[in-house]
Amino acid sequence: MSGRDYLRWSQIPYPGELYPPMNAVTPEAGSWPMFFVSRRGQDFIDPFGQTIQWNIKNPNTIDWESELIIVQQTLKNITPQQIRIAQSWGTGEVSKQLIPVIYNMMETYGIASTKAARFLGFYHAAINDAFVMAWHFKYLWDVARPCQYDRNLVPVLFTPRFPGYPSAHAVMAGCSEAVLSYYFPQERFRINQMMEECAMSRLYAGVHFKVDNDEGLTLGRQLGQIVVNLIRSQNI
């Protein structure tokens, strides 16, 4: 199936349902205010007044049939470890999983309480912006989920009630990677591995295409770098 023929999330029923999904989760979230990105008409502006060109593929350029095969093969050959990864990252919010890790790193490297408070403020604000940008593109492009492409697909986890592209887990993971790696450069490799696993967990779960995760990571890292550029400019 060529990109221009991709299925729309809002038009295809989920397996076992007769009608397309009607209970979309917070479709307006893509228009919510952000902390590090502002809007000027149809443009997005960074903290330094520069127009942002987001690094994410238009779904019209993606081979969704090939992406579906990847999901099908992943679920067919799923391992117990991959199921555990899917369940671990799929339980609760991504930030809930990361906060204990963040506090541990702050203690390990002796981050002063004042700087810790400032860092946590930046981090949570960045996660807000990651969510908003993920939702902006999800509802802009309205890309269907794997289970809507293949109604016989049996995901490991429940498929969320909102469009799939890009993966919000992946956008948050990419953004987190950029911000955390700036504050804790000694942990850069471990952070990268953790965030890659977070994104990949959505493929293991069967609720996202691989490209949802790949492009989500790219978008999140770009946003995270915007945040880091502002932090660096303040020299704190």
Image (tube, rainbow, N blue to C red):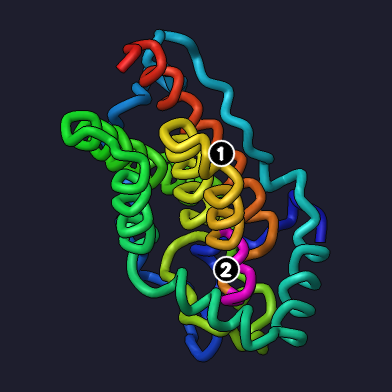
Q: Quadrant of residue 36?
A: top left
Q: In the rendered structure, which segment of residues is drawn in magenta?
A: 199-206
Rendered position, 22 above or below 171: below
The residue positioned 26% from the left and 39% from the top of the image is 120
Distance, label 2 to label 1, CA atoms, is 17 Å
- Which residue: 78% across, 70% down? 70
**Which label sits on residue 136?**
none
Residue at horizontal 81 percent and vertical 61 percent from the top: 1
For mark 2, give the secondary structure. helix
Q: Can residue 34 be seen in this view?
A: yes
Q: In which quarter of the image is residue 21?
A: bottom left
Q: From the viewer's side, name the closer residue of 208 and 202.
A: 202
- Does the rendering let one see residue 30? no
The x and y percentages for residue 65 are: 80, 65
Question: In front: 114, or 94?
Answer: 114
Mark 2 or mark 1, which has the lower sequence index?
2
Which residue carries the number 1 mark? 219
Residue 89, image x, y percentages:
46, 69
